[in-house]
Amino acid sequence: MKDKKTSRKRLWLYRIAAVIAAVVIWLMVVNTDDPVTRKRISNIPITFENTQVFTNNGMTYAVEGDIDTATVIVYARRTVVDDITAADFSASVDFNMINDMNGAVPVQVSYNGRTSIDSFSVVTDTIRITSENVISETFDVNITTQGALPEDYSVGTITPDPAQVIVTGPDSVVSSIYSVGAIVDISGASEDITQTVELHYYNFRGQEMDLSEYGDELYISDDTGVITSADVHISILYGTVVPVEYQIGGTMRVADGCVYTGYQAGVTTASIRGPEDVVTSMGSIVVSSNDLNVANADSDVSVTIDLADHVPAGVLVEGDSLVDVVMYVERLVTNVYEIDPEDITLNGADTDRYSYTYDGEAVTVALTGIGETVDAVAAEDLVLSCDVSGLEEGTYQVPVTVAVPEGCTLEDDVYAGIIVTENETETESGPVGSGSEDMERSSAGEQSPEDE
């Protein structure tokens, strides 16, 4: 009985061993015909989630090494492994899982393919993040020119649109920008230039910076939105030299007892630049009398004139356009001269018939002018004359003509008292042939009969 039970037990053991052997043999056959193998799959795009962790805090982030893809090693049957690609995986980084704004964050990878695989391992299991503040800075757009213009032409105003740009991005990048601008070629231009130029960015050494490598990290804008270029207008000006004319107003309306004597200006010609048609039509710069006026003035008047206010729109005055103008107003003085009547020349005297004498009173001449002019005139410098033609015997107040020196005026009319006396005739002086007649003949240069 005991032998019978032992035989049954052995029979079951043999059966189990056979099953195990069959399974092992099956596995050996399967693995021999379609074994599990491994494959390295790269370039799985990494999606960055919850980036607002940085942006909400005014920051930006960067991945050390610029890593933006993940790599896995997949294990699968040889018959299917070759069909597995990066598209069967998805990778992501959730910034909500970062503990330090400048630290490591895990890369989550999942398999989404339809083909069955045994397993996979992630090679790129973490990435390191660095962060920094986002700042904005405003830069003037500087336009420089290159090339030569024709003779007599020059560059006027340079107007970029926009005149300023705002660069927003990582502190380290924005702070390294020193200037923004562009270069425009003006060679041979004789008319205004308008063109669109690409903006360039330079560091403090003057080296151009390539901002394209920062991609979406940088935002360049003006008050209208994102920009990459600017419209530039350059005015080309024609230059020449013109005289400056000063119109003095109120010269006849200075204060009583004063006289306007002239002006002195610091500039008599000016170099101007502007549109050629406008400049060539200008004969001069005329400074209006509204700005230069001596009405009611009793002393010198000094004013500063800006020539830029007296040229047409679009015309520039080169150099310092401010001019000092002095208008001279001097007080008048009156000098009185006593003239001996004997020094008066008689014009038209009939000396054959009349004798002319003065009433003995000195003739008074009053001259008015500015002090230095009148004071330079002496009594002996004055030339006086009067016309006595047609006057018969009698006493007269005859108008005296005075040769007035330059810069002086005669204050009052001048008169001289003249006595006209008729000369004695031969009848009145004695008989014919008397001694007196002989004296008259002698004084006249005639010879008497005895001399003959």
Image (cartoon, helix red, strand yellow):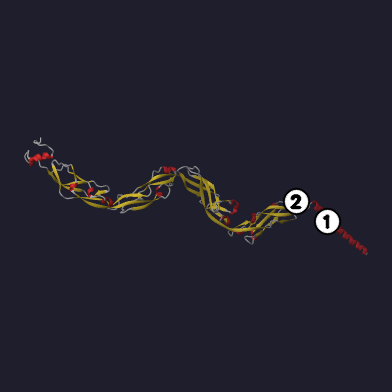
Residue 297 appears at what percent x and percent y?
31, 53
Tell me which amino acid carries mark 2.
Answer: Val
Image quarter where the N terminus lies is bottom right
- Give the side of residue 441 with respect to residue 23, left or right: left
- Give the side of residue 35 with respect to residue 227, left or right: right
Inspect this view and state whether residue 261 appears: yes
Numbered label attached to residue 278: none
Query: Secondary structure beneath disc 1?
Result: helix
- Residue 189 or residue 312, whichever sits in front: 189
Image quarter where the C terminus lies is top left
- Residue 81 or residue 361, whichever sits in front: 361
Compute the Cα span from label 2 to label 1. 23 Å
Vertical arrangement, residue 135 with respect to residue 312, above or below: below
- Residue 359 or residue 426, whichever sits in front: 426
Residue 281 appears at what percent x and percent y?
41, 42
Of mark 2 and mark 1, the one earlier in the sequence is 1
Give the residue pinned by disc 2: 80
Residue 242 appears at what percent x and percent y?
40, 44
Tell me which amino acid carries mark 1.
Answer: Val
Give the residue pinned by disc 1: 24
Vertical arrangement, residue 326 with respect to residue 188, above or below: below
